[in-house]
Image (cartoon, rainbow, N blue to C red):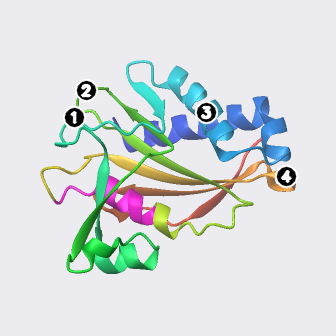
Amino acid sequence: MDFRKINGKIICALDILITKDEYLLKNDISERSISHKLAQYLSNLFPRFNVDCEYNGNVEADSGKKYIFLLKKTAEKYGLLKRDEKENEVVTRHVYPDIIIHKRGKSDHNILIIEIKKSSSDISINYDIEKLIGYTSQKNEKSLNYTYGVLLIIGVKDKFNKIKIQWFSSGESITPLSLISLK
């Protein structure tokens, strides 16, 4: 699917979210509630695909679960390195993406993976960026093979109609983090 079409559908779904769920945003309700509502709107815009929240299945993995590869120093940086991994240069971490657009049971239709943060979050976006790089990387045969990844920083409270967006593909950022205003 063409990047412009996907981007347009994301913007459309965000516009619907801001219009229909202003209450969630203005009242700084949980990220999972916001992700769920956005996934509902995306389902209508991607009718031939499955849109899932917190989906961790991966038909290509021996474990049947999604995981990404991290360099040891990256895992250490985010406090994710386990004691028995001190000798490893690369470690794996199971992941639960906020929203994915795909076809269940296949890995050749992984269209888009979305990581969401609220503007009020104290948690750094750096690990989300690392995950998006891993999700879209095509460097090994067991990669998740998502064509695109997107980081959404959703405005809440008085910034409820402002969203920061950054796109990823082939294991790297393809757009800078940009502010968009909707409604």
Majority secondary structure of the magenta segment? Answer: helix
Q: Position of residue 121 (x, y in %)?
A: 69, 61
Q: Is residue 136 visible?
A: no
Marked residue nearer the N-terminal end (2 or 1)? 1
Split into 4 quadrants, where in the image is the C terminus? top right
Earlier along the polypeptide chain: callout 3 or callout 1? 3
Characterize the local packing of mark 2: few (<14), some (14-19) or many (20 or more) Cα atoms within 10 angstroms.
few
Depth check: 7 or 82 in front?
A: 82
Q: Is residue 116 left or right of residue 139?
A: right
The residue that disc 4 covers is 157
State the mark number for residue 168: none
Asked if the stretch drawn in magenta spans residue 20, the answer is no
Residue that protrudes farthest toward the left in the picture: 141
18 above or below 106? Answer: below
Residue visible at 69% across and 31% down?
A: 16
Which of the two labelled residues, at mark 1 and mark 4, occupies the earlier sequence position?
Answer: 1
Label 4 and label 2: CA atoms lie apart by 38 Å
> Do the numbered discs 1 and 4 sit on residues whose CB atoms are within 8 Å?
no
- Inter-mark Cα distance, 2 to 3: 21 Å
Question: Looking at the image, which residue is at 67% across and 39% down?
Answer: 34
Q: Label for residue 105? A: 2
Which circle, 4 or 2, is nearer the viewer?
2
User: Residue 105, how many percent across, how many down?
Assistant: 25, 26
Q: Is there any visible trace of residue 143 in the rendered image?
A: yes
Tag 4 secondary structure: helix
Q: Are marks 2 and 1 in contact (CB under 8 Å)?
A: yes
Q: For the N terminus, give its image quadrant.
A: top left
Tell me which label, 3 or 4, sits earlier in the chain. 3
Residue type at tag 3: His
Residue range of the region highlighted in magenta in the rendering? 129-139
